[in-house]
């Protein structure tokens, strides 16, 4: 993992002793390195130098308030996809004008909340949504600023479940439809339609599809300008991938920025980028204790106290995450384990046939690259409370999310004692 000062054999991560941390706060435990997040923000900021660009961090990657606050302090705005993410972004101190609202199914209530808060821009994904924003903005007597999310029909060369820029995906509209919206823009007097948006997918390890999609957006922008439309914002979404395993090569922020520089030369508005994973994934680890080692008839299982409810990516996408044993491995033999959680599904597997130093019950392991799409995709499946999260910085740590209590987990439920008519 880049940017993270760590040494798994000494168990020190960003200056903090992981064994002590686990004893203090319990496991499973998410641990995020503040310096690693700052360093990614700085690197992206530096790469975008000279472009009139704004970073709109994709809150879905990791919406923990302390993480959002850290990113906001470094100058990030937010890309949100729900009223809940709006609340988080505002609570973290992100100015409403620096928030863009994406997503294919914004409800009337969410559109109303976003207008009331004054979000900077809606990224519109369908004609029905454009009509809804017009109707709700007119009723409130306000103007909404909006971009059209175009679907460039480009294969992002990533996992099918997180590819979003092909014509058959639910996201965005064809460039021809977007053109029709611009040409008929007076139909929506309460919507200032002056931007283009796209997002072709996540965990992109090749920049070639990005370059192709950006070029399609650039060509469309130029056509709109020739037709007399004024374009204030070009938003290329997120998607920059990270290196989860040896042999993978993550794209460089500078190469990404160069693509934008070339394609959007002469553009005098704002360029927006919406990275999520790239900023936070490698800054996080999931600490977990070995509950027991089980020698099955066919395989050897390392059963952890973390499970698919805490980290879903391996179960959902068969995603690879490096797993390391915390402590000195000198003299330990290597063994192959299926690393699993205690949840009642065979899919509750973090890794198959993974070679690790011999592990014993009570020892600590870390699942790496879990700063993004990990805690944010967590659930309480099997009635397992959400784990705690800490932010480490300068040899100290802050508990930024308490482990959910059993009471909190069931607090909103009640017996069926009062029966109402709908
Ligand atoms: C509209 C939009 N923007 C930004 C992102 C962030 O993506 P990533 O975390 O891959 O940078 C996503 C998620 O893929 C998204 O749907
Ligand atoms: N949840 C996905 C990424 C989806 C990005 C959201 N559009 C992951 O864990 O990799």
Image (cartoon, rainbow, N blue to C red):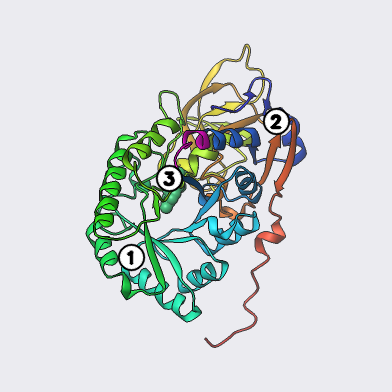
| Location of residue 35 in the rendering, given as x and y in whole percent from the top left corner | 64, 33
Q: Is residue 165 visible?
A: yes
Crowding around mark 2 (Cα neighbors within 10 Å: few <14, some 14 to 19, many 20+) is: many
Name the element at disc 1: loop
Helix or strand or loop: what does disc 3 sit on? loop
Cα gap from disc 1 to disc 3, whole angstroms: 20 Å
> Callout 3 environment at 10 Å: few (<14), some (14 to 19), or many (20+)?
many
Q: Which residues are magenta?
A: 44-51
The spot of residue 352 in percent (x, y) is 45, 32
Residue at which label 3 appears:
238
Which callout, 2 or 1, points to the residue nearer the camera? 1
| Mark 1 burial class by Cα count in 10 Å: few <14, some 14-19, many 20+ | many
Residue 74 location (% of width, % of height): 61, 42
The residue carrying mark 1 is 126
Q: Tell me the residue at 65%/72% (across/down).
A: 414
The residue lying toward the viewer, choosing from 385 and 133, is: 133
**Residue matched to label 2:** 18
On screen, residue 38 versus residue 102, left or right, reads: right
Residue at disc 3, CB closer than 8 Å to ligand 1 = yes
Name the residue at 62% across, 77% down: 416
Mark-to-mark CA distance, 2 and 1: 47 Å
Question: Residue 30 lies in what quarter of the image?
Answer: top right
- In the shown orientation, is residue 145 left or right of residue 131? right
Q: Are marks 1 and 3 in contact (CB under 8 Å)?
A: no
Nearer to the camera, 211 or 67: 211
Residue 346 appears in view: no
């Amino acid at each position: 993992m880049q940017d993270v000062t760590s040494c798994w054999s000494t168990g020190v991560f960003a200056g903090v002793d992981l064994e002590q941390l686990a004893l203090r706060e319990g496991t499973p435990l998410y641990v995020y390195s503040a310096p690693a997040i700052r360093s990614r923000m700085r690197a992206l900021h530096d790469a975008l130098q000279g472009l009139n660009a704004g970073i709109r961090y994709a809150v879905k990657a990791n919406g923990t308030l302390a993480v959002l606050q850290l990113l906001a302090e470094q100058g990030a705005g937010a890309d949100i996809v729900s009223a809940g993410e709006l609340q988080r972004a505002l609570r973290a101190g992100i100015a409403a004008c620096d928030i863009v609202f994406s997503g294919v199914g914004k409800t009337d209530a969410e559109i109303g909340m976003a207008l009331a808060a004054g979000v900077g821009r809606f990224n519109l994904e369908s004609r029905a949504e454009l009509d809804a924003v017009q109707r709700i903005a007119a009723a409130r007597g306000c103007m909404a600023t909006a971009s059209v999310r175009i679907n460039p029909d480009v294969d992002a060369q990533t996992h099918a479940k997180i590819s979003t820029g092909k014509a058959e995906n639910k996201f965005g509209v064809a460039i021809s439809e977007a053109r029709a919206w611009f040409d008929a823009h007076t139909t929506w007097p309460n919507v200032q339609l002056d931007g283009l948006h796209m997002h072709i997918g996540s965990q992109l390890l090749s920049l070639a599809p990005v370059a192709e999609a950006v070029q399609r957006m650039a060509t469309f922008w130029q056509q709109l300008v020739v037709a007399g439309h004024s374009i204030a914002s070009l938003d290329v979404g997120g998607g920059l991938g990270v290196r989860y395993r040896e042999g993978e090569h993550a794209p460089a922020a500078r190469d990404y920025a160069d693509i934008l520089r070339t394609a959007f030369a002469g553009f005098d508005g704002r360029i927006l980028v919406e990275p999520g994973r790239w900023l936070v994934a490698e800054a996080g680890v999931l600490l977990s204790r070995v509950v027991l080692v089980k020698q099955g008839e066919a395989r050897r299982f390392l059963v952890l106290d973390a499970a698919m409810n805490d980290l879903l990516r391996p179960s959902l996408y068969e995603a690879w995450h490096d797993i390391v044993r915390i402590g000195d491995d000198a003299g330990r033999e290597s063994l192959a384990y299926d690393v699993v959680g205690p949840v009642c599904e065979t899919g509750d597997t973090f890794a198959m046939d993974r070679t690790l130093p011999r592990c014993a019950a009570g020892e600590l392991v870390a699942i790496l690259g879990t700063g993004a799409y990990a805690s944010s995709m967590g659930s309480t499946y099997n009635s397992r409370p959400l784990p705690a999260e800490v932010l480490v910085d300068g040899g100290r740590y802050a508990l930024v999310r308490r482990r959910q209590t059993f009471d909190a987990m069931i607090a909103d439920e009640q017996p069926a004692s009062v029966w109402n008519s709908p």
